[in-house]
Image (spheres, grey):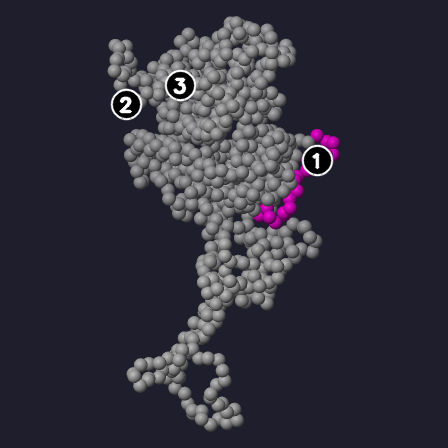
């Protein structure tokens, strides 16, 4: 290869030479050419002026020759070319600069943020850097505020007020239209359980939906009777407002079918001294700026007695079923109002339903120390003159657990801004050796009075009067650092509700108790730091579900088969688990076909109930050959509807059905008795007793006989009498190494499947395997007969994990017993 010589004309310019030539051209100021006409008539231009001495002699010692005045317009026109050339030169010279201000600094003074942050540049160069940033095309033309950027991220979902605090510490997921915390990023499964059993744990449940009903008391009572579980026993005592009612909600007049979800119902207490007169509701309180939907037509009217006072109800439910609950209440109100209108046409009334989502916040503080945490973080106002409250509030210090209080008791109060006494200290139990006997608190309507029911008061408190920086400025003026701030007249007084909350089954000793704190919207972050400062843990969706599992109670939607959202929940979970299973190498994943697991991704209730199973053949295709028996089966429409039988009277009802010779007719009679109890008609004659019993499911809890811990979607099998006697005989005997020496068992046939586990794991409070599942009512009656034949007091079944090969014996009991 021949090297090019240095002076070779064919050699191209280097980048350095091109850059130098570009800068030189950019810094050249154009000069107006001198125009002269030659003899031939052509115009000759001299181009740019050459550098050299000027031919014009300037005299500095005299003012002679200068004009007395200057015509600015003519002078500007004469010098237009020079002015334009100067402006272009300034612009091109500035754009040709290849170094920014921050690039001219020594390397030890350069900062990465200096390219976009003027404050990172030394003070002497900030003006120049600011000018460069202004003319830079790469910089942002419009600065978006932080509030706008956060609101932009909430277009397809809603954030809670405590979202940013949770997002820094927990794993977040999109659920039910919200961005919710699933579980803490730190290892917290066992610490969260210990906090719920021996300390306190907080969960922000502000995402729960809230619906308000207003109308005559008699009408509202009938509305609830038409769509609530007829087995609920606290309807009358909850109408005073001193207690909340926890029940299940169905579609209007559809019991026992069409279960929607469990709900919590709260009645607004009547004013003090007015238990029969109508409540005076101000027009401002009755009319809301929110979009409200009337029941029936735009203004559905009906009759009611003059003695029925105007009342208000709050229905709190899961956010995923808000539309279904709203539609059920709307339909029930329409039926009640229409029936009353046909009965009486003289006096009329109306029912109003409002959507209060986002109007209030709710914190669930669970654990034995929940009372001390709330007492230490909150300070009640001084001007509360209710004698019942004056007895209750001091007794909260010595309350070791809320299990000693009446279930669902409501305490209404007004507290000061919790930030005034930050940092708080938990209330201390007395340790003087004397027995602690706190004051007994009984439900009372006067104790449940609270201004949080007033929409005007909530709207005024939607934004705190003082920000944190304002309170910090007041705190900095204290002579002694760390002393609480004295409340002033301008400080906010926040109304709230304290509701006793218990997670427990009727015959279980592993209940978890605490409080539900309901307060106006806008106060999530002012309350949260004060409640968790003294060591209260914060839990997400996993921790909340674990609390229900450890307490032995059903958790919606995980443990509620035969509901629409149960199917949707398990379908979404099946998609995730199947995708993970497909990503796993075949050698590292379970082979469900060889294990004999028919439905590994979701519970196959059709097999459990003995209903016809849809095959993989296209429904639009008709077999070419059809026998006479097949033709008869096509004409028969399936009448079996799966439904879930749950409630406090389930053990009593099943005990009566067991004693009857005809179980089908006995169950139908009990269901009709419950329907007529709430003013509903008996079931239609098209529902045959055998179909009603065949489609009924009941919740059960399972406890392992010896060892093992079932997982979710574990399969429940029936056992025969011989195997049941063998298990009873070997109970209590140690079998070390039995699983390793014995060959794997063959999976039982599909015909022996009687149910599925919806939640199973090792129970930390019990120290053994525990599970919650569902089986048919007919199978439960057969298991009871089998236990009587074998002389056993408990029912026996066997459980196999969907990815396991070993069936383990377990005791089965009703979840509601």
Camera-side residue of 184 and 775: 184
Report the span colored magenta.
Answer: 410-435
Image: 219 above or below 37: above
Residue 509 x, y percent position in the rendering: 59, 23
Dot 1 falls on a residue whose secondary structure is loop
Percent across and percent down for residue 471 are 60, 53
Q: Name the residue under label 3.
A: 606
Q: Does the magenta run of residues contain 479? A: no
| Disc 3/disc 2 C-alpha distance (Å) | 21 Å
Say if 313 sits above or below 477 in the image. Answer: above
Are the residues tagged 2 and 1 within 8 Å (C-beta)?
Answer: no
Circle 3 or circle 2, nearest the eye: 2
Disc 1 designates what residue? 430
Q: Provide residue 437's location: percent of width, then percent of height.
A: 66, 31
Labels 1, 3: front one? 3
Crowding near pointer 1: few (<14 within 10 Å), some, many (20+)?
Answer: few
- The answer for how far apart the CA atoms under marks 1 and 3 are is 58 Å
Is 554 on the left-hand or right-hand side of 108? left
């Amino acid at each position: 290869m021949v090297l090019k010589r240095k002076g070779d004309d064919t050699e191209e310019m280097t980048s350095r030479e091109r850059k130098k030539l570009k800068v030189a051209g950019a810094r050249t100021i154009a000069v107006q050419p001198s125009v002269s006409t030659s003899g031939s008539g052509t115009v000759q231009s001299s181009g740019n002026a050459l550098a050299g001495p000027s031919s014009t002699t300037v005299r500095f010692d005299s003012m002679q020759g200068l004009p007395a005045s200057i015509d600015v317009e003519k002078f500007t026109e004469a010098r237009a070319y020079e002015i334009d050339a100067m402006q272009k030169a300034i612009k091109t010279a500035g754009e040709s600069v290849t170094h920014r201000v921050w690039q001219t600094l020594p390397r030890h003074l350069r900062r990465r943020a200096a390219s976009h942050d003027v404050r990172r540049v030394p003070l002497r160069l900030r003006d120049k850097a600011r000018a460069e940033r202004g003319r830079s095309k790469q910089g942002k033309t419009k600065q978006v505020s932080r509030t706008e950027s956060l609101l932009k991220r909430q277009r397809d979902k809603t954030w809670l007020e405590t979202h940013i605090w949770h997002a820094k510490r927990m794993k977040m997921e999109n659920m039910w239209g919200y961005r919710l915390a699933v579980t803490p990023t730190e290892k917290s499964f066992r610490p969260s359980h210990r906090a719920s059993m021996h300390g306190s744990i907080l969960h922000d449940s502000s995402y729960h939906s809230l619906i308000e009903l207003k109308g005559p008391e008699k009408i509202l009572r009938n509305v609830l009777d038409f769509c609530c579980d007829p087995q609920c026993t606290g309807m009358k005592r909850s109408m005073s407002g001193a207690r909340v009612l926890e029940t299940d909600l169905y579609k209007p007049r559809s019991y026992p079918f069409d279960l929607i979800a469990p709900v919590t119902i709260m009645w607004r207490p009547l004013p003090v001294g007015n238990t029969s007169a109508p409540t005076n509701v101000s027009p401002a309180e009755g009319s809301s700026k929110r979009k409200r939907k009337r029941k029936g037509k735009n203004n559905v009217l009906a009759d009611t007695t003059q003695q029925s006072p105007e009342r208000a109800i709050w229905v709190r439910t899961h956010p995923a079923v808000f539309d279904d609950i709203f539609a059920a209440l709307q339909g029930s109100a329409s039926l009640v109002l229409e029936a009353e209108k046909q009965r009486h046409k003289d006096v009329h009334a109306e029912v109003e339903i409002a959507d209060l989502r986002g109007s209030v916040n709710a914190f669930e503080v669970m654990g034995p120390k929940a009372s001390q945490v709330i007492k230490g973080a909150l300070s009640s106002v001084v001007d509360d003159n209710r004698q019942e409250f004056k007895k209750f509030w001091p007794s909260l210090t010595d309350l070791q657990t809320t299990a000693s209080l009446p279930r669902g008791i409501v305490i209404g109060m007004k507290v000061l801004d919790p930030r005034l006494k930050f940092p708080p200290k938990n209330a201390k139990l007395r340790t003087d050796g004397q027995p602690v006997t706190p004051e007994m608190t009984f439900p009372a309507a006067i104790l449940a009075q609270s201004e949080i029911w007033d929409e005007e008061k909530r709207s005024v408190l939607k934004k705190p009067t003082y920000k944190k920086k304002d309170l910090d400025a007041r705190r900095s003026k204290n002579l002694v650092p760390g002393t609480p701030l004295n409340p002033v007249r301008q400080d906010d007084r926040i109304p709230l509700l304290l509701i006793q909350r218990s997670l427990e089954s009727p015959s279980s000793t592993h209940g978890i108790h605490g409080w539900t704190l309901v307060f106006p919207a806008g106060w999530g972050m002012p309350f949260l730091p004060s409640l968790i400062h003294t060591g209260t843990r914060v839990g997400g969706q996993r921790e909340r579900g674990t609390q229900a599992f450890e307490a032995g109670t059903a958790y919606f939607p995980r443990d509620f088969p035969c509901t629409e959202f149960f199917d949707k929940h398990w379908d979404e979970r099946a998609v995730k688990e199947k995708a993970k299973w497909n990503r796993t190498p075949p050698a590292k994943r379970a082979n469900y076909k060889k294990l004999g697991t028919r439905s590994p991704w979701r519970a196959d209730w059709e097999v459990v109930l003995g209903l016809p199973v849809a095959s993989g053949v296209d429904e639009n295709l008709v077999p070419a050959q059809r026998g006479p028996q097949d033709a008869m089966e096509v004409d028969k429409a399936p009448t079996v509807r799966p439904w879930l039988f749950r409630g406090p009277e389930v053990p009593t009802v099943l005990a009566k059905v067991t004693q009857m010779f005809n179980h089908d007719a006995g169950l139908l009679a009990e269901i009709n008795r419950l329907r007529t109890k709430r003013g509903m008609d008996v079931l239609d004659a098209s529902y045959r007793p055998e179909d009603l019993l065949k489609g009924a499911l009941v919740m059960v809890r399972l406890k392992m006989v010896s060892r093992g811990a079932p997982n979710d979607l574990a399969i429940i099998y029936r056992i025969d009498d011989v195997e049941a006697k063998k298990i009873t005989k070997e109970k209590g005997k140690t079998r070390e190494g039995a699983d390793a020496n014995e060959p794997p068992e063959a999976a039982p046939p599909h015909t022996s499947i009687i149910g599925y586990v919806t939640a199973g794991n090792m129970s930390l409070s019990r120290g053994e395997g525990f599970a919650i599942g569902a089986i048919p009512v007919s199978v439960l009656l057969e298991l009871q007969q089998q236990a009587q034949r074998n002389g056993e007091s408990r029912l026996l079944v066997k459980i196999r994990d969907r990815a396991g090969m070993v069936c383990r014996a377990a005791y089965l009991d009703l979840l509601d017993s």
